[in-house]
Amino acid sequence: MKSRDKKNDLLKKFKQGKINKEVYTKYNKCYRQLIKLEHENCFKKKLVEAGVNGKEKWKVIKEGLLLKQEFTNIKEINANGINLTEENDISLAFKTHFETCATNLLVGTAIGQDTSTALPQGDEWKFQPTNESELVKIIKTLKNKNSSGKDCLSNRMLKMEMYTFAKILKPLINESIETGIFPSTLKEANVIPVFKKGDKSNMNNYRPISLLPVLSKVYEKVLNIQITKIIDEGYIDENQYGFRKEHSTEDAVLKFVDKIEKDLALGKNVATVYVDVSKAFDSVDHKILLTKLARTGMDTNGIKLMESYLKDRTQIIIVNNRETGQFYVINIGVPQGSILGPTLFKIYIMDLHCHTNLFCMKFADDTSLEGASNTKDELEMLMNNEMAKVNNWFTNNKLTLHPEKSKFIIHSKDKLVNIKLGDRNITRCGYGLQEESVCLLGLQIDENLDWKIHLQKIEKKIAKGNYLLWRHGKKMNIKLKKVIYESFIRCHLLYCITIWGGAKQLFIKPLNKVLHKAWSKIGGKKIHTQNRLKKFSLLKLEDELAIQESKLIWKWEHKKIAPGLANIINEKHDRLRGRRFNLERSSKLNSIHSRLVRRANKNIKQISEYTTKKNLAINMKKLIYSKYTFVCNTRNCYTCGNT
């Protein structure tokens, strides 16, 4: 305070002409350095106080590095051309919108055919009663959250008295299963409009997220475990990657791109279509869903229970953390934010692949299709015929496709192909066009599969981490800098690296330059890159790729890979010594298949020796770091100052 007052006093004197400008600027500079130093000391002190508590540490980091995003209230909404600013009016507008958005899409839609007949009728099964030990396990798996639904109970409160709650809930849940009636109090949800992207005043850009009673989550998990066990045995195909254990977005994209590359290697004309479904979760028809549940063999009492779960769900709108009393009853869709919602949607679309000859990859409501043919004309005919079947399936299941938002890419040389969805043309993406790529689960897919656009996106993403290391470098010690590097740079590099890692050096070179800048901000200046990487346990891009490819081969070797990726590489069964893998002669050198086969042929013996994926990564890193040592023999070296 004294320093500030003196600074202001000097400024006043300078304006009056009593002192020179240099006197004021010198003191002002010193004053600002003191403030900066105080901020740094305060930040470091808070980090020490946080100790080993990861949550508290991240809270301090977000505040200290200005990463904390302020919660933005919904200030204005446009409803039917009228701008609303009052909270009650905004809440009422959201109520009307969420209540009618799905039903409006279905206006004039006729009752379609039952598409689930393409699947075999399952043997009858019924929900089994639960027990206290199962309920305790389920409660333990709940995340440590303080948010609560209408019952005012949080996950954290439930976990504090898990054995007591398990004892109370057991007879209640078993009685509900036996009678086939889902408690109405567990169907009451607080609905929060969550902004997605685009215009903040447009209600279509908000997603309704349900905050359900925590007891409902426990009950739903009991049912979900039993349903998942049945459908995974024969109803969910291997190319459905959403909401499944040991299946990830990376697995889904890996399978899809590998299929494209293999068809191109055979000399075929290849096209991919990425369809967009409007309000997919909100448009699920209950009657169709119950028919598909019956197809799995669920008994009549189970169907009655699921109907009771879906019917007459009460939802109350929460706007800007305030309950405005706007509630509505909904009888369409599956609740977003629930445990059963994703599983029920998975069942709803489980027969889609049976109605098309195209390769169909599904992840939740993202559906991507791939077709290949010998000629351009055959490809166009195939894609249009199959897309008509796909469109028919969506119509029969009362899901609305968006032809304007759906895209397609031609991966072969001849691009003059038109693909229709219904009676409208789909937009083609490619170099030189309005849209050059399609984002599939976070990966930018382009027509040449050269990953140029995706690498440019990664450069932009890691620029934030680079900026933080530069802007707040003096505040942070090496350990904290490593946290920033892992959280804002390395995570973007590792995502789908097994797919884009084979890109040409021409496109990877700019990314490596950005990486070198980030590395130079970790540790002192006078140190060679190789020694810096070894000292601070950092890895080059090519070494990150080697580890991730080895991990994938390890998963394949130990049969822990998603079933859809079981044929990503194939082992030769001959009488020659050593293990060898089939390499398709026509495959490109930088394709996923070629890279994995070459690595498997070279290192399968070493990879298979490790019992865990973690041990494999640790030992590979040790070997890589041992090669990073660099001895500088240059006198008066500019980098390290060697004399």
Image (cartoon, rainbow, N blue to C red):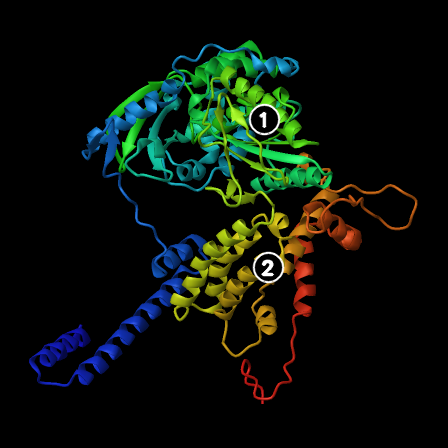
Residue 152, given in percent of the width and then of the height, sits at 33, 32
* Front position among marks 2 and 1: 2
Which residue does the image show at 68% across and 31% down from the upper left?
375
In depth, the one of 277 and 466 nearer the eye is: 277
In depth, the one of 525 and 228 nearer the eye is: 525
> Which quadrant of the structure image shows residue 639?
bottom right
In the image, what residue type sits under mark 1? Thr
Residue 228, label in figure: 1
Q: Quadrant of the N terminus?
A: bottom left
Dot 2 falls on a residue whose secondary structure is helix
Residue 311 visible in this rendered orientation of the protein: yes
The crowding category of the residue bearing disc 1, from other C-alpha atoms within 10 Å (few below 14, some 14 to 19, many at least 20), is: some
Residue 213, given in percent of the width and then of the height, sits at 39, 29
Q: Quadrant of the C terminus?
A: bottom right
Lower sequence index among marks 2 and 1: 1
Dot 1 falls on a residue whose secondary structure is helix
Residue 489, given in percent of the width and then of the height, sits at 50, 57
Residue 244 visible in this rendered orientation of the protein: no
The crowding category of the residue bearing disc 2, from other C-alpha atoms within 10 Å (few below 14, some 14 to 19, many at least 20), is: few
> Which quadrant of the structure image shows residue 541?
bottom right
Residue 506, label in figure: 2
Number of numbered discs on residues: 2
> Which quadrant of the structure image shows residue 215?
top left
Which residue does the image show at 37% across and 18% down from the upper left?
103
Residue 229, given in percent of the width and then of the height, sits at 62, 26
